[in-house]
Image (cartoon, rainbow, N blue to C red):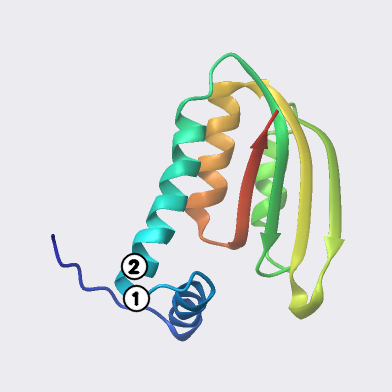
Amino acid sequence: MGIVSISLNDESLGALEDIQERFGLKGRSEAVRVAIAAARAEAKVIEEMEGIVEGVLIIVKKDHSDPWMNLVQAKHENEIKTQLHSHLKDHKCLEVMVVSGEAERLSAMLKEIHSTGKADYVTFVKS
């Protein structure tokens, strides 16, 4: 088994410890493996999309004042059929979107959202 050394900020370390506790895992390494498996499963869903895809995209943005999500939405306005925006505590926002479009476009949108690192939560529920 390989060994990887990583640096985590306090928030990420707290999240890792929370994963460990909630799943009853013996150590941080197990928590990292669980997190990787979850990310891998989501990446597989994105990778295997083909044709016309429909679903619901749920995002919790870290900072309401950061316009990055508006730019993503403008770029992908043809794929977004319905959108709900709600303000949450601590200047966060919830975005819920019903999306429909070519798999390539939706995949690009999801990759763009994930790659910014500006969302606390992103999940796509494919219909």
Tell me the distance, in whole angstroms, between the alpha carbons under discs 1 and 2.
5 Å
Q: Is residue 56 visible?
A: yes
Rendering quarter of residue 68: bottom right
Are the residues at dot 1 and dot 2 in contact (C-beta closer than 8 Å)? yes
**Outermost residue, bottom direction?**
10
Name the residue that disc number 2 marks.
30
The number of numbered badges drawn on the structure is: 2
**x then y, percent, for residue 115:** 47, 51
| Amino acid tagged 1 | Arg
The circle on residue 28 is 1
Report the side of 49 relative to 70 (left or right).
left
- Under circle 1, the secondary element is helix
Report the side of 85 relative to 57 (left or right).
right
Residue nearest the observer in this picture, 63 or 44 = 44
Where is the C terminus found, in terms of image quarters?
Answer: top right
Report the side of 12 relative to 98 (left or right).
left
Residue nearest the observer in this picture, 20 or 125 = 20
At a point 49% along the width and 82% down the height, the residue shown is 14
The circle on residue 110 is none
| Amino acid tagged 2 | Glu
